[in-house]
């Protein structure tokens, strides 16, 4: 079936009152962004709804367009549609019968015609048109039967400037359009959890920046590329990401040399949060995002989170906090980050990890240990900020 156009349905943004147009504009912008590699499209708003169609005289791959739209947060459903200019009743019958014929091979279905007459010059009103078209379809395809309460096929026929016909609803990702809820800084590692965390917060309309801490020569260039690949995959949903790559080696070495080894991870995590927060603040970020999940590892017990969280003044979003590993993996597979995440490249956290890390760190004790860094840490932090390499993921 060759469709001419898509009707885009959106859920939550319908209820935002005066802000509604901001949400719709953000949605239109994100749709254009998502479609830019698929072809040339026109996206327009019309009586509280959004439509997309290929630019006049251009071709596009329908499946690819649908895949792209399925990644645009804010869309609750994508309805492929055909448009007909000729509103003569007899022509309309032909078009509707052909549509049904082409769309549904097996006609052992229940259906209902839902006609809507927005163009008041059209001679039949909605109820009458629904009934007449239903009757014509039953004549054309005797296997069909009508069910007005719970039909297999809800055939929508809208009489507007043109006639719109659609019956298929492809679920969108839901959520809110990116750009409607500020910006946050994702701490992005090469693991499974943090890309999922970024995806989930982006789904609430939040634009993303990201920070990755690498530790050359202990972590390789390939490990960094893996993180860039993950950011690219997340950006298919979130839109552009500025990825900050920070050289963390010297800070890590100093902690390793001066602090108790069972506290290494916690102290490291505190500096990561501090650095990420400062980069966020410089770039209008309003929150931090991590892939932490309660109890998953020693540094993610409730006591550990209390101690790492203490360095932050921005809110820290941890959307995976209540999820089991398998639940996180399921999302990673769905969004296409899993395959990259499981590639076996070294992570700066695992290289310096202690055999028996503290699971219930005490804030006072940790702060005391950190004092051992007092005479070097300011300079090391300053140097780390200088290494900031920004990779624009588009
Ligand atoms: P992930 O799968 O996201 O790597 P993880 O289960 O391996 O998570 P940790 O290594 O303890 O958990 O890291 C917890 C969180 O800290 C990560 O989800 C991520 O947000 C952040 N993080 C860890 N390592 C780095 C890093 N090298 N660069 C940036 N952020 C990091
Ligand atoms: Mg990790």
Image: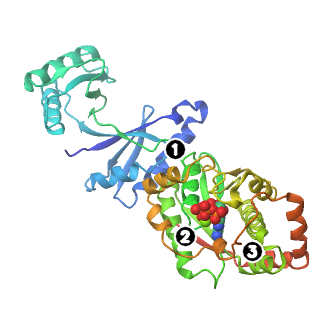
Q: Are marks 3 and 2 in contact (CB under 8 Å)?
A: no
Identified at 75% across, 74% down, the residue is 385
* For marks 1 and 3 on the same chain, the one whose residue lies earlier in the sequence: 1
Q: Which residue is mark 2?
A: 227
**Circle 1 or circle 2, nearest the eye:** 2
Residues packed near mark 3 inside 10 Å, few (<14), some (14 to 19) or many (20 plus) = some
Q: Residues within 10 Å of mark 2 (few under 14, many from 20)?
A: many
Decide: is 21 above or below 160.
Answer: below
Query: What is the number of the mark on residue 323?
Result: none
Helix, strand or loop under label 3 = helix
Report the Cα–Cα distance between label 3 and label 2.
19 Å
Q: Quadrant of ligand 1?
A: bottom right
104 w.r.t. 71: above or below:
above
Q: Closer to us: mark 3 or mark 2?
A: 2
**Image-quadrant location for residue 272:** bottom right
At horizontal 34% and vertical 52% (from top left) the residue drawn is 65
Foreground of the two, 254 or 230: 254
Q: Which mark is residue 25?
A: 1
x and y percentages locating residue 40 in the rendered image: 35, 56
Quadrant location of the N terminus?
top left
Q: Out of 342 and 157, give the one closest to the viewer.
A: 342
Residue found farthest to the front = 356
Q: Earlier in the sequence, mark 3 or mark 2?
A: 2
Residue 365 located left or right of residue 155: right
Q: Which residue is mark 3?
A: 385
**Residue 248 spot, x, y in % from top left:** 71, 76
**Horizontal and vertical percent for residue 152?**
25, 28
Q: Residues within 10 Å of mark 1 (few under 14, many from 20)?
A: some
């Amino acid at each position: 079936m060759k469709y001419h156009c898509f009707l885009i349905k959106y859920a939550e943004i319908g209820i935002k009152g005066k802000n509604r147009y901001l949400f719709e504009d953000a949605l239109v912008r994100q749709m254009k962004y998502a479609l830019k590699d698929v072809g040339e499209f026109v996206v327009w708003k019309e009586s509280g709804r959004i439509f997309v169609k290929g630019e006049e005289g251009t071709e596009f791959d329908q499946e690819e367009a649908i895949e792209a739209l399925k990644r645009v947060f804010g869309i609750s459903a994508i309805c492929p549609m055909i448009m007909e200019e000729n509103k003569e009743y007899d022509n309309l019958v032909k078009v509707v019968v052909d549509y049904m014929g082409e769309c549904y091979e097996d006609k052992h279905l229940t259906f209902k015609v839902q006609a809507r007459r927005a163009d008041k010059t059209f001679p039949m009103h909605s109820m009458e048109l629904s009934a007449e078209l239903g009757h014509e379809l039953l004549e054309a395809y005797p296997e069909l039967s009508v069910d007005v309460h719970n039909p297999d096929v809800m055939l929508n026929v809208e009489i507007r400037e043109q006639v719109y016909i659609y019956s298929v609803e492809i679920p969108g990702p839901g959520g809110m359009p990116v750009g409607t809820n500020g910006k946050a800084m994702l701490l992005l590692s090469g693991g499974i959890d943090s890309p999922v965390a970024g995806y989930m917060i982006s789904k609430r309309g939040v634009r993303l920046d990201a920070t990755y801490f690498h530790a050359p020569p202990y972590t390789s260039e390939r490990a960094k590329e893996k993180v860039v690949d993950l950011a690219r995959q997340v950006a298919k949903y979130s839109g552009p990401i500025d990825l900050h790559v920070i050289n963390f080696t010297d800070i890590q070495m100093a902690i390793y040399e001066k602090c108790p080894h069972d506290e290494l991870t916690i102290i490291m995590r505190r500096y990561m949060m501090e650095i990420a927060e400062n980069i966020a603040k410089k770039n209008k970020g309003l929150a931090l995002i991590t892939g932490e999940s309660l109890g998953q590892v020693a540094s993610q017990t409730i006591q550990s989170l209390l101690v790492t969280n203490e360095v932050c003044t921005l809110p820290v979003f941890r959307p995976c906090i209540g999820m089991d590993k398998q639940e996180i993996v399921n999302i990673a597979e769905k969004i296409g980050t899993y395959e990259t995440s499981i590639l076996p490249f070294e992570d700066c956290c695992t290289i310096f990890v202690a055999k028996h890390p503290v699971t219930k760190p005490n804030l006072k004790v940790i702060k005391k240990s950190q004092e051992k860094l007092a005479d070097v840490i300011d300079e090391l932090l300053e140097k780390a900020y200088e290494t900031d390499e920004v990779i624009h993921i588009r």
